[in-house]
Amino acid sequence: LECYQACRPAASWDEKLRASLHIGVAAALREKKETKDALRQASLAIQLLPESAEALFQRGVLHYDQGDWQQSLRDFQDAKRLSHALPNLNAWLKRARHARSCDSGDTKRKNYYWVLDLLCDCELSDVKKRFRQLALTCHPDKIHSSSEAVVKSAEARFKAV
C-alpha cells in the first residue's frame, strides 16, 4: 500500500498511470478488508479513466463484497462491454447474476461472507476454518455464563453464522 502511495507524485502527469495506481490501492485495501476506502479508490480510478474495464471490474468485486448485487452486476456488465479479456470476469458475472436473482422482493439475500468477515473469493477451506472459529466463540453450548443476556447474544450470533 505504501509503495502505491509513494508512486502517486511521479504519476501526476499520466491519467492512465494514476488510474492504475488507484486500482492497485483498491486491491490492497480490499485485502486489508477496508472495503469503503477500496471502493472510493476504485471509483477515483473510474473518474480518471471511465473506459477502464479493470477499474469497473475491481469496483464490481467490491460491491459484491458489500452485498450490493445489483451495482456489482452493472459494473461487471460494463467491464465486459469494454473488454472480454479480463480473467475471471465471466465467473464473476455468473455469481452476480445468481446473487441478484436470489435477492428479489421482500427476501434480502444474506451475505454470509460478510458475516464470516471473509472476502467473497476466498477458498472453501477459509470458510470452514472461520466457521469453526466463530462456532467455538458463540455456540450456545460453549458459553458458560450465568448472564441470560450473554447467552441470548451468543445464540443470536450463532444463528447469524
Image (cartoon, rainbow, N blue to C red):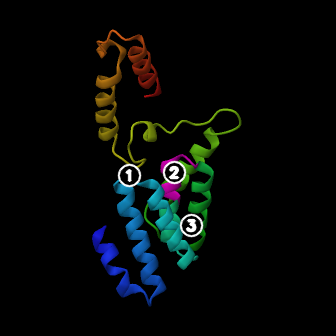
Q: Is residue 151 magenta?
A: no
Of 114 and 52, the residue lying toward us = 114
**Residue flagged by tag 1: what amino acid is it?**
Lys
Q: Quadrant of the N terminus?
A: bottom left
Residue 84 x/y as whole percent: 52, 69
The answer to whether the residue labelled 2 contacts the one labelled 1, judged by CB atoms less than 8 Å apart, is no
The residue positioned 42% from the left and 76% from the top of the image is 20
The residue pinned by badge 3 equals 80
Q: Looking at the picture, does residue 11 appear above or below residue 119?
A: below
**Residue flagged by tag 3: what amino acid is it?**
Lys
Assign a secondary structure to mark 2.
helix
The residue pinned by badge 1 equals 33
Return the residue found at the far right: 105
Residue 66 x/y as whole percent: 51, 48
| Quarter of image, res 139 | top left
Assign a secondary structure to mark 3.
helix
How packed mark 3 is, by other alpha carbons closer than 10 Å (few <14, some 14-19, many 20 or more), is some
**Residue flagged by tag 2: what amino acid is it?**
Tyr
Total number of numbered discs in the rendering: 3
N-terminal-most mark, 2 or 1? 1
Q: What is the magenta range?
A: 60-68
Assign a secondary structure to mark 1.
loop
Report the Cα–Cα distance between label 3 and label 2. Answer: 16 Å
